[in-house]
Amino acid sequence: MSSTRTAVRTHWVAVRAMLIFTAVLGIAYTIVVTGIGQLVLPAQANGSVVESGDEVVGSSLIGQSFTDADGEPLPQWFQARPSAAGDGYDGGASSGSNYGPENADLIAAIEERKAQVAEFNGVSADDVPADAVTASGSGLDPHISPEYARLQVARVADERGLPETEVAELVESRIQARDLGYLGEPTVNVLQLNLALAELG
């Protein structure tokens, strides 16, 4: 009888502990953290969405392709780096290729991309920066290097009938400095650059 009471008491303690921790950690903690996020960093907490007019056109944290229905790059837009996430910039399939730097398939892909980027932009293959031909580790990086953005200026300006200097100035105005002044490299957010470009005409 005593052992039965002990077992019942032990199980009841376990059930109460589970209910308390579920309420505290599963409900209260979630509400508090969500509330703090909404109060302190509402844009980030809601996905860092980017709007054009009244329409959500993307996120400043996830890249997207500027291609036609066949997947061909549209020459009137600045292009992002390659993506290995699903069919490209798929937030549900974030990944890199996981190829090492000496992998024959990766080397062949880089050489092919380098030739395509060079031809598309009318430049020498030697001028194509690394981020133009390699995917980020997540496959979702929305940024390119200032060098890659500058490489595309002449093509974009020509396609849109805009002065090259005007498009170049737009790129320079969109360069984001290193985080905290020393972490990482300067970058350009492609979506935000293209939205600013659309305002030029």
Image (spheres, rainbow, N blue to C red):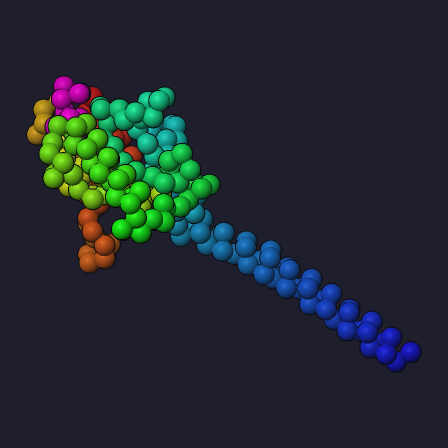
- Tell me if residue 40 is in the magenta stretch: no
Q: Is residue 47 above or below residue 64?
A: below
* Image coords of residue 10 (percent x, y): 77, 73
| Displayed quadrant of residue 124 | top left
Q: Residue at x 23, y 54 (%)?
A: 184
* Image coords of residue 129 (percent x, y): 17, 42
* Image coords of residue 91 (percent x, y): 43, 40
State whether residue 38 appears in this view.
Answer: yes
- State the residue in front, 3 or 54: 3
Q: Residue at x 49, y 56 (%)?
A: 33
- State the residue in front, 189 or 17: 189
Q: Quadrant of the C terminus?
A: top left
Residue located farthest toward the bottom when viewing the structure as drawn: 2
Query: What is the span of residues highlighted in magenta in the rendered image?
Result: 154-161
- State the residue in front, 193 or 91: 91
Q: Is residue 170 above or below residue 99?
A: above
Query: Left or right of 161: which side holds 110?
Result: right
Residue located farthest toward the top when viewing the structure as drawn: 161
Residue located farthest toward the front when viewing the structure as drawn: 104
State whether residue 59 appears in this view.
Answer: no
| Displayed quadrant of residue 94 | top left
Query: Left or right of 18: which side holds 144?
Result: left
Most frequent secondary structure within the magenta stretch: helix
Residue located farthest toward the right when viewing the structure as drawn: 1
Query: Left or right of 151: which side holds 101?
Result: right
Q: Residue at x 36, y 21 (%)?
A: 69
Q: Residue at x 17, y 28 (%)?
A: 119
Q: Is residue 146 above or below residue 9?
A: above
